[in-house]
Image (cartoon, rainbow, N blue to C red):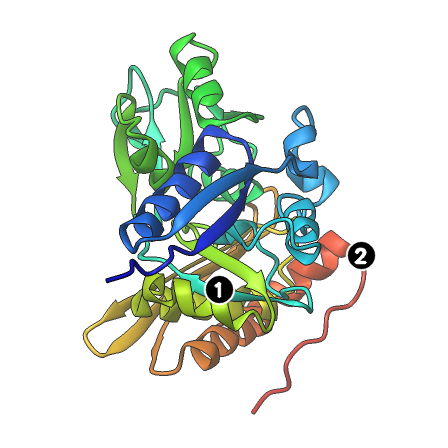
Amino acid sequence: MTETPKTHLRIGSRGSQLALCQANHIRALLEQHGHNVEIEIIKTTGDKITDVALAKVGTKGMFTKEIEEALAEGRIDLAVHSLKDLPTEISSGFEIAAITEREDPRDVFCSQKYQSLDDLPRGARVGTSSLRRQAQLKALRTDLELHPLRGNVDTRLRKLADGEYDAIILAAAGLNRLGKDQFMRHVLPAEVMCPAAGQGALALEIRAGDFATAELVKFLDDGAARLTTICERALLSKLGGGCQVPIGALAEVRGDRLHLDAIVASPDGGKLLRESREGDDPMSLGEETGETLLRRGGAQILEEVYGHTVAQPQQP
């Protein structure tokens, strides 16, 4: 009896510790199904810019462009991305073949000395380079000193350990995947810190029409993760998806319905709009929630940030 030949797959990944951890996780699942898998490390624009806040340089495609080029050229067969790094409009020629079972999508409060945001003294130094986190922190606590925090997870945790910050805010998913829980103090509920659309989810991107690879990885697609992230990304798309505007979205399957919490805020946290809705269709729920936020003042926030008029939805 001849052994069925094993399929050889090449995964493209960023070289950070977290990106490689995620790529190796997918590799292990594929190898369990009898595939030969190798990982090719690809340096992206976002990896090369480490001293500038991402919101100032724009993040659209910063962590994906070079990986997609390798995919288009056939140097790799699939790419493993943090879904939140993928633009809402996938470039033509590519498709998302699978969205894997989701890690905890929420943000987490990390500190050596303090147990929660409420415990922080006035003037405490908090590190984050995310405009979304900064705006929500400012809306909660105007007395905190917010400072930029770039670098990989280890770098950020080392800066916290060295006393550069009283606290930092990180994604629970990254800490969980890396097993770095020594400074995790409190998982922040969406009502306090609404996470980024797609946070905690991994996307497997392939060339459009590559049916062979699509077939090999389809077992990794998680129904709940796809539903919730479609909903969140629909909201992000409706709001323009710009990296200069703090936008948060978290969808959850509750019973047989989808529940969506979303925020849009001015960068200084002076205006923060929050909306929660339930629905059955993920795309419609995301778009309708986005329309409601635009009508309630989100369009004005976007106009102030981008300096031009944003199309507001017509009243039904």
Residue 212: image x %, image y %?
A: 49, 69
Q: Residue at x 72, y 75 (%)?
A: 311
Q: Is residue 126 above or below residue 296?
A: above
Dot 1 crowding, Cα within 10 Å, few <14, some 14–19, many 20+? some
Instruction: Name the residue that disc number 1 marks.
Output: 213
Quarter of the image with the N terminus in it: bottom left
Which label number is shown at residue 307? 2
Q: How many numbered discs?
A: 2
Viewer-side residue, 103 vs 130: 103
Query: Which image quarter: residue 308?
Result: bottom right
Residue 6 in view in this figure: yes
Above or below residue 302? Residue 53 is above
The residues bearing labels 2 and 1 have C-alpha atoms spaced at a distance of 43 Å
Q: Nearer the viewer, residue 63 or 67?
A: 67
- In which quadrant of the rendered image does the C terminus lie? bottom right
Q: Is residue 191 visible?
A: no
Residue 64 shown left or right of residue 33 in the figure: right
- State the residue lying farthest toward the bottom: 316
Amino acid on which disc 2 is placed: Gly
